[in-house]
Amino acid sequence: MAVSQALGLPALIAAYSLDPTIVPLVLASLGGVHFLPYSWLHRSRIYLYLAAAVSLGAFLIQLLLPSNEFTIILLFVAVIYWVAAIPLYRNAARLTAGSTTKMQV
């Protein structure tokens, strides 16, 4: 599952060759592709929301702010990752606490 980003490398190379300003958009899309399967693996909708927010948000920024999209998309992705880190950490802590309790019984 983690290899999905490597499969997108040709898209990144093509984007850089054709128009370097869309590289952040392609990176955000690859991030969405990377996180989407984890919603199934971890049975958590947090990854689904993260993948959708990163991909769709970057696409909307590209459409609405074509003059400043390069920097704004990179900052947007960083903010979304930091915001998503909080519920992901809480979910992992909850799952870890639940599995530790079950092992002790």
Image: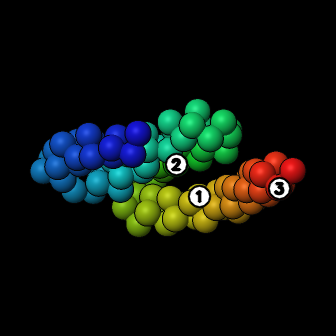
From the viewer's perspective, tell me whether residue 38 is left or right of residue 93.
left
| Quarter of the N terminus within the rendering | top left
| Tag 1 secondary structure | helix
Q: Callout 3: helix, strand or loop? A: helix
Q: Give the residue at mark 2.
A: 54
Dot 1 corresponds to which residue? 80
Separation of marks 2 and 3 at Cα, in angstroms: 39 Å
Q: Which residue is mark 3?
A: 104
Q: Amino acid at mark 2?
A: Val
Q: Is residue 64 left or right of residue 105?
A: left
- Kind of element beneath mark 2: helix
Please say if 47 is above or below 94. above
Mark 1: few/some/many CA within 10 Å (<14, 14-19, 20+):
some
Residue 82 seen: yes
Labels 1 and 2 touching (C-beta < 8 A): yes
Residue 32 rendering spot, x and y as whole percentages? 47, 43
Res 98 seen here? no
Q: x and y percent of residue 20 in the render?
A: 22, 56
